[in-house]
């Protein structure tokens, strides 16, 4: 693609969501958004780049402040339609140093230099004549133009806005930057492609690249999730001991290290996911801390993300051990587990995973005569599902989140349970791999590939 890419200036009244629209359409979380009117004071271009290639760029601009005064200046001289853009240029030229018109000059400049117009209004507020001067000025620039109705609140004045906007803009569309998903983004791009003939092919090509890019991000996420599961489920830690028996303190320490290591693997995966989906600032601002607040090994985590006892029985993973009640019965084989006292020490109040549930402990011999204790792989039958569903939930939240939405992710437990009920067929493949990993066997490449594909399918249905 050549250097020339379509550019759009996002303009309108102050505080109508212009910067929010730029942020969402450019996938850029650094765009400054605030409840205060007059937040944006300078024009600034935000490109949407894929592999270093700019697909399009959006100008964030300040809101109109003195539209009426400017329109009356423009109208001081009778100007035929084909000369009106020159009149606007003249206005900019003559008022460049006048602080009264700085906002308008900032917003008009990119348009005069060839950017298409995206005019943003709030469809939850009534239409009013105060917008007419703005729309007239934009008409005078002669640039291709589209109006976006953003419903900031629940009241609905869309019909009257459509009537008014339809008289001034080539296209009128609804678009909510806080809720827009990938499909809506694409639909909007398709409309933008129609704005100007020279841009049509470029934007269509961009849409293709953009869709591929989305698939690529889902692929990366699936690979990352698969690696997290493999690394976590096959994790073992060892520590050398004197004599033939480890002290309780040694066992305790190794088990704690083991759990910490698993938490860290999850955290690292979340970080990479935030990077893939361009949400590192959100992560930095702790707005994503939802899962970190629910410890991987807590009872709450199992309730939210684990399989129910019925589901566990259906997998066959837990075998005949699941007939009674209580957490301990959710465990797979327990031949090498330690006495129950230590479990109580480590577990603490409310914790799901005591020592016993975390890992098998083995005493290993060594050729130099030293003995080692080994913790892992983790034996809890539900753990693979807890880990998997946590990371799937995280991925879904982060992948679907428009970049204008900076609010903390909230956990909706009913949604989690509803959304992440896995089909029996899916569960079978997952079980196969989990069992192998928990036994300490490396799964064959073919099974890993199958697992990855499965994760991809789960994500593609949920990232929209
Ligand atoms: N609930 C909701 N809030 C929105 C929506 N769009 C924008 N907002 C909020 O409205 C406020 C203004 O949004 P901005 O994107 O900064 O608006 P702006 O038009 O760039 O404002 P200025 O730069 O001050 O002219 C922010 O608090 C946004 O979070 C929306 O669709 N829904
Ligand atoms: Mg702004």
Image (cartoon, rainbow, N blue to C red):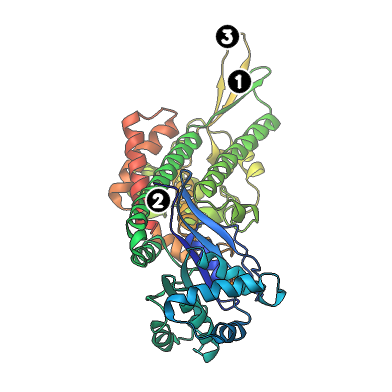
Q: Name which residue lies at 61% across and 41% down.
A: 343
Q: Which residue is mark 2?
A: 214
- Real-space Cα separation, disc 1 to disc 2, in angstroms: 47 Å
Nearer to us in this view, 96 or 263: 96
Q: Is residue 116 above or below residue 349?
A: below
Which structural element holds mark 2? helix
Q: Residue at x 47, y 70 (%)?
A: 117
Outermost residue toward the top? 368
Q: Is residue 249 above or below residue 52?
A: above
Dot label at residue 418: none
Q: Quadrant of the C terminus?
A: bottom left
Residues packed near mark 1 inside 10 Å, few (<14), some (14 to 19) or many (20 plus) = many
Determine crowd level at label 2: few under 14, some 14-19, many 20+ residues with C-alpha closer than 10 A.
Answer: some
User: Tags 3 and 2 in contact by the CB under 8 Å rule?
Assistant: no
Sequence order check, earlier mark of 3 and 1: 3
Task: Confirm whether residue 315 shows in the render.
Answer: no
How far apart in space, not on screen, are marks 3 and 2 (Cα)? 52 Å
Left or right for 455, reference 348: left
Q: Which residue is mark 1?
A: 372
Q: Earlier in the sequence, mark 1 or mark 2?
A: 2
């Amino acid at each position: 693609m050549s250097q020339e890419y379509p550019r759009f200036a996002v303009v309108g009244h102050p505080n109508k969501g212009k910067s929010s629209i730029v942020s969402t359409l450019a996938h850029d979380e650094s765009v400054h958004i605030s409840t205060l009117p007059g937040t944006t004071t300078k024009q600034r271009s935000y490109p949407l780049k894929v592999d270093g290639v700019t697909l399009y760029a959006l100008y964030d601009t300040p809101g109109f402040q003195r539209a009426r005064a400017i329109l009356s200046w423009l109208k001081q001289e009778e100007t035929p339609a084909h000369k009106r853009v020159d009149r606007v240029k003249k206005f900019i030229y003559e008022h460049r140093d006048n602080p009264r018109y700085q906002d308008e000059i900032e917003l008009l400049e990119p348009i005069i230099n060839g950017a298409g117009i995206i005019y943003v209004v709030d469809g939850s507020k009534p239409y009013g004549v105060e917008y007419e001067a703005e729309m007239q000025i934009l008409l005078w620039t002669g640039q291709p133009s589209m109006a976006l109705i953003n419903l900031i609140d629940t009241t609905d004045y869309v019909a009257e806005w459509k009537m008014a906007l339809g008289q001034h803009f080539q296209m009128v569309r609804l678009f909510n930057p806080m809720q827009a998903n990938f499909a809506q983004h694409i639909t909007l791009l398709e409309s933008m492609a129609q704005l100007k003939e020279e841009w049509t092919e470029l934007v269509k090509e961009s849409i293709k690249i953009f869709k591929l890019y989305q698939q690529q991000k889902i692929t990366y996420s699936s690979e990352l999730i698969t690696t997290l599961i493999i690394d976590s489920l096959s994790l073992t830690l060892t520590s050398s001991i004197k004599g033939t028996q480890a002290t309780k303190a040694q066992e305790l320490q190794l088990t704690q290290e083991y759990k910490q290591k698993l938490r860290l693997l999850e955290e690292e995966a979340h970080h990479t996911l935030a990077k893939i989906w361009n949400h590192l600032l959100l992560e930095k601002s702790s707005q994503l801390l939802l899962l970190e607040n629910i410890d991987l090994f807590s009872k709450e985590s199992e309730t939210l993300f684990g399989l129910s006892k019925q589901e566990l029985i259906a997998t066959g993973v837990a075998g005949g051990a699941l007939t009674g009640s209580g957490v301990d019965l959710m465990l797979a084989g327990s031949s090498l587990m330690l006495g129950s006292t230590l479990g109580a020490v480590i577990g603490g109040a409310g914790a799901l995973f005591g020592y016993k549930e975390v890992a098998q402990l083995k005493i290993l011999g060594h050729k130099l005569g030293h003995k080692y204790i080994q913790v892992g792989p983790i034996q809890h039958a539900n753990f693979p599902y807890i880990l998997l569903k946590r990371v799937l939930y995280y991925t879904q939240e982060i992948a679907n989140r428009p970049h204008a939405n900076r609010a903390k992710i909230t956990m909706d437990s009913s949604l989690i349970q509803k959304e992440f009920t896995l089909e029996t067929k899916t569960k079978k493949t997952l079980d196969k791999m989990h069992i192998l990993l928990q036994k300490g066997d490396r799964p064959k490449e073919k099974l890993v590939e199958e697992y990855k594909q499965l994760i991809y399918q789960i994500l593609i249905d949920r990232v929209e």
